[in-house]
Amino acid sequence: MDNGAGANHKVKFPADFAWGVSTSAHQVEGNNFNNQWSAWEKAGRIKSRDHVGLACDWWRNAEQDFDLARTLGVNALRLSLEWSRIEPREGTWDQDALSRYRAMLQALRDRGMRPFVTIHHFTNPLWFEDKGAFAAPESVRLFERFARRVVESLGDLCRDWSTFNEPNVYAALGYFLGEFPPGKKGRFIQAARVTRNLCLAHAAAYRAIHEIQPQAQVGWAQHYVVFKARKPESAIDRWIARFIDRRFNNNFADSILDGRAPFPLDLFGDSLPEVKGTCDYVGINYYSRLRIGFEPRSPRTMFFLLTVPPHKPQGDSGIEVPYGEAYPEGLRHAVQRFLPFNKPLYILENGVPDRADRIRPWVLESTFQQLNTLLAEGTDLRGYFHWTLTDNFEWNEGWHLRFGLIELDPETQARRLRPSAEIYSKLIQGTNGHHG
C-alpha cells in the first residue's frame, strides 16, 4: 500500500475491500408476526404508532433491491436471519424459510455481491422470549443450536458471519433504559447477566460455526458511541461520560478481548475464559456523538441526560430524543478502541437519519476521508457498509427515521434514489481503479 504523505493523498483501497450496505430482517422483510418486536408493536409500544406491515417487502421480493444495490456498485450486502421464521416453534425447523434465505444469498452471489450474514439482529421468536430470552441460562444452548442449523443450511453460500448485532444495545435498551422489549428499566444486574449469556452464546456459536465451516470468518457488530461531558468543566459530568463510555462501548467487547465477565459481575470474581479470543474480525457500528451529563430532575433516564448542541450537524431527531451529532471524526475513536484485538476491522454500519438528504452527502464524503486516512496509516480495515440501502422500519421510531440511500414509500412500495445514492456510488467507483 502506498502510504504517501499528506492527508489528501489518495490511498489505493485494497482490491477486495468490501463496499456494502447493511440491513436487518425484521426491518425489511415484512409480515414477521412471530417475534417479540411484533408483540411490542401490537402492545402499542412503537413511539411513532407505525406498523411494520410489508416493510420493504423483501420476503417476497428482496431481489428488486439487490438489483438497485448492484447499480450503485456495492460488492457486499449485510442481511440478517429471522429466527422466528426458521424455528417458528421450539425444535421445529421451517425448510421453506431456509430455502428463501438460500435464494437470497444465491441472488446476491449471482449479482457479484458478497453476503455478510447476521445470525441475531435484535429479534427473538416468541417461544424463546417466553422462556426469558437471553436472561435464561438455556439461551446459550438454544442459540448455539440455531447457529448450527443455519450454517449447515447456508454455509456453502456464505462465509462471513456476525453472531450478534449490537449486544450492548440489546442489553442496555431492553433491561436498563426500557426502550426495547422486554422493556425493563434500571435492571443493572440483570442487564449484566443478559450480556454474560450473550457472550457465552456468541462463543458457543463461534466454535460451532468453525466446526462446520473451518474457513468461516466469525465476528459480531459492536455499537460505538462517542460520549462527551455535557459540561466539560463539571467533574461529575466528566466522570459520567467516562463511566458510560466504558460500560456501553466496552460491554461485551471486553469479555471477548480478555475473558473478563461484564461489569459488575467481574467485581464478584466472575470470569469468562471460554469467551476470550472468539472472533476473527471486529465489526463496528458507528453513527454519532452524544453529550452526557448529570440531571437530578430526570429519574426516568437514571439521572443522566443525553443531548446534542443545536448548532452541531445532526440528522433528523427521534420522536423523544435527538438521534445524535453527526461526527465523522468519531470513526477514528471507534477504530482505535478496537485495535487491541489485533483483528481485521469492518465498519458494519454507519449512516444518518436524514429524510431530505440534507447532510448525508457530507457524512458520506467526510467518512470516506476518514477511511482513506485510516488505511493510509496502515489500519487493517477490510470493509465499509452504509446503513442502509432502502428506508426501513426503524424499531421504536417506525417509519419516522429514514436512513436509506433509496427513499421508500411504505404504502405504494415505490422507490426513488436519493442524491446520496449517487455520491456513494461515485466514491466506490473512484476507489477501484476505474475513475469517472
Image (spheres, grey):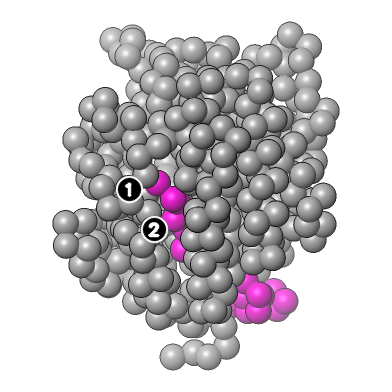
Residue 173 placement (x, y as % from top left): 43, 27
Residue 396 placement (x, y as % from top left): 31, 35
Q: What residue is drawn where x is 44% and y is 91%? A: 436
Residue 252 placement (x, y as % from top left): 64, 32
Indicate whether 363 appears above or below 182: below
Residue flagged by tag 1: what amino acid is it?
Answer: Asn
Residue 248: which quarter of the image?
A: top right
Query: Left of 32 or right of it: where is 278?
Result: right
Q: Please name whichever residue, 85 or 114, is drawn nearer the observer in this view of the structure.
A: 85
Query: Left of 242 or right of it: where is 2?
Result: right
Q: Please name whichever residue, 204 or 430, is drawn nearer the observer in this view of the structure.
A: 204
User: Which residue carries the number 1 mark?
Assistant: 31
Give the Cα separation between the discs numbered 1 and 2.
8 Å
Image quarter of the N terminus: bottom right
Query: Left of 108 or right of it: where is 309?
Result: left
Q: What residue is drawn where x is 33% and y is 29%? A: 40
User: Which residue carries the number 2 mark?
Assistant: 59
Q: Are marks 1 and 2 in contact (CB under 8 Å)?
A: yes
Residue 40's tag is none
> What kind of secondary structure does the magenta stretch mostly adopt?
loop
Q: What residue is drawn where x is 34% and y is 30%? A: 39
Please report the bounds of the magenta region as a residue range: 1-26
* Residue 373 visible to the viewer: no
Tell me the SS state at disc 1: loop
